[in-house]
Each structure stands twice: as C-alpha cells, then as structure tokens.
C-alpha cells in the first residue's frame, strides 16, 4: 500500500485539531508552507531547539529566574540579533518563522513566538498577550510579571503600557466612566488565539494587495482553526468569489447569511450572494 503524504492544509488541520496537543511553535511555523511549500518543518524546529540548547549550556543549574531572563534577552536580542523589521514591516515573510530565523527580522508576533519557545526551553514561563495594535510577551517571575516588547526587546512599565493603550481606549470610547483596567488587556492569549492573530495579519496584508490566491490560502486555515467564527467563513467566501469559484463562494456566503443573524453586514452579504447566484459560473472557453 502506497503512503500518501497529507497536503499542507490537512497537516495544519491535524496540528490544530485539539487544544491539548496544540504546539504553538510548530503550528506557527506550518503557516509558512503556503509561501514555502518545500519547507522542512522538522529541520526548522531542530534549528530552534539548537538555539535553545546553546543557551541552556550557559546557564548554571541553580540559575534564578531573573538570571535566566537576563541571559535570554542578551542572547536573543543582542547575540542572535533578532529585531523588528522596521524597513519592511508589511512583508508577508515577517510572519514566516523560517524566514525570521534566517533574517533575524520579523514583526512582534513572529519574534514573540520564537522568544517564547526559547524561554520555555530554559525554564521560564512566557505567554503571549494580544495587546491592541502590538503583540507582547509576559513572563511569570517570582517578583511578579514582566511584560516584554519582542519587537524592541524592551521591558515595559505600567506607565508605558498605559501610554500605548491610551489611543486605542479613546478610539473605542473606553474613557471616563467606561474606562477598563489595564489588566484586562494583559490577559494571556491561548496558542490558538496567537495563531489566529498571525493569520489575520496576513489576511489583511493580502486583502490590501488584492492577492486573492494567497488570501484564500489564509482564509482556509482560519476556517479550520476557528470553525465557529462565521466572519472567517464569510471572508473565505469573498475570496472564492474574487477567484471565480462560484459554488464555493455561494456555499460560504449562504452559511454566513443564514447563521449570522445579528451581523451588521448581513444584508450586504445577502445582496452579494444574490448577485453571485444570478451571474452563475464563468463560461468555459
């Protein structure tokens, strides 16, 4: 019996099937397979493990959490040279962990995923934070939590976090009697939420570029990752429509219109659905 390797999307589906076995680093790395179909995932994971092993060898067995954190930051940001890609922030490769490993440049969330993996391998507890506008990492220390900006390597004080959050709170009307505490925005993100944010970053880049094939690849992953998120089904349908895949677009938009009773754009999507049904598939030539 001949073995048939799973497709990229089948492999992704197996990785995200349940939260108990959800490996953030491996899942995040697998996103790059859309852009790099020949990517050797195991080799890339082994490369990260080798970076962690080099760091572990420098740590005394009885090193305190603070000593581990200081050495990790010096190693990650200074010796290895990981930093934010300020010259080309919206390059999709900034979300591909294999490219970030090669160039040492990325965006907050991709840098954060690699940083968290190294932190975990040297005995630190690090979690992602889906902070508005800028992904952060927090580390649980005996003295309390440390909040890091993986883009710059800076530790952020409460005052600095409040300052970063202020424009968002004002935009959302979360001021005065509607104000909410900073701690609400510093909740740990689950691995599934981290990957969803990575994919939505890519979705927005491809939407702006009108790169529908790549947007569809991302949308397919989001529907698998978040099966209950109707807006992802809608966006996949819209991508199918742009690519002339009428049946698939109609199926997705029908599901959205039928189930998203409270959605503000339900009427607009119903009109788009009617237009698709009237136009029918493109004729063959």
Image (cartoon, helix red, strand yellow):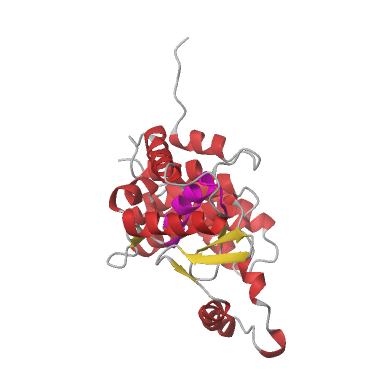
> Which x, y percent locates residue 42?
41, 33
Magenta span includes 169: no
> Which x, y percent locates residue 142?
64, 60
Give above or below for 264 relative to 224.
Answer: below
Q: Which residue shows up at 45% across the image and 43% down it?
A: 56
Nearer to me, 252 or 79: 79
Nearer to me, 172 or 120: 120
Give above or below for 38 relative to 220.
Answer: above
Write down the region rendered in magenta. Answer: 108-125
Nearer to me, 55 or 230: 55
Locate residue 172: give its quadrant.
bottom right
Locate residue 271: give its quadrant.
bottom right
Note whether residue 2 is visible: yes
> Which x, y percent locates residue 54?
39, 42
Q: In the image as oriented, which residue stretches furthest toward the bottom?
A: 176
Locate residue 161: give its quadrant.
bottom right
């Amino acid at each position: 019996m001949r073995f048939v390797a799973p497709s990229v999307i089948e492999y992704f589906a197996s990785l995200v099937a349940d939260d108990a076995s959800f490996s953030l680093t491996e899942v995040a790395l697998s996103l790059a397979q859309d852009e790099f179909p020949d990517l050797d995932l195991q080799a890339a994971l082994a490369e990260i493990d080798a970076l962690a092993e080099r760091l572990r060898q420098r740590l005394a067995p009885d090193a305190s959490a603070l000593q581990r954190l200081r050495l990790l930051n010096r190693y990650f940001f200074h010796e290895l040279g990981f930093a934010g890609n300020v010259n080309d922030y919206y390059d999709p490769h900034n979300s591909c962990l294999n490219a970030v490993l090669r160039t040492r440049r990325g965006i907050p969330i991709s840098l954060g995923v690699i940083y968290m993996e190294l932190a975990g391998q040297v005995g630190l507890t690090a979690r992602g934070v889906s902070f508005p506008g800028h992904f952060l990492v927090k580390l649980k220390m005996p003295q309390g939590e440390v909040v890091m900006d993986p883009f710059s390597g800076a530790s952020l004080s409460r005052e600095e976090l409040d300052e970063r959050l202020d424009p968002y709170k004002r935009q959302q009307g979360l001021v005065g009697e509607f104000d909410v505490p900073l701690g609400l925005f510093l909740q740990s993100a689950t691995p599934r939420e981290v990957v969803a944010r990575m994919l939505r970053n890519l979705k927005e880049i491809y939407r702006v570029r009108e790169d529908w094939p790549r947007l569809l690849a991302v949308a397919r992953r989001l529907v698998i990752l978040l099966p209950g998120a109707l807006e992802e089904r809608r966006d996949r349908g819209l991508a199918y429509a742009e690519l002339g895949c009428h049946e698939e677009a109609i199926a997705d938009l029908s599901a959205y219109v039928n189930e998203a009773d409270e959605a503000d754009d339900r009427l607009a999507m119903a009109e788009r659905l009617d237009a698709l049904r009237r136009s029918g598939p493109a004729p063959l030539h």
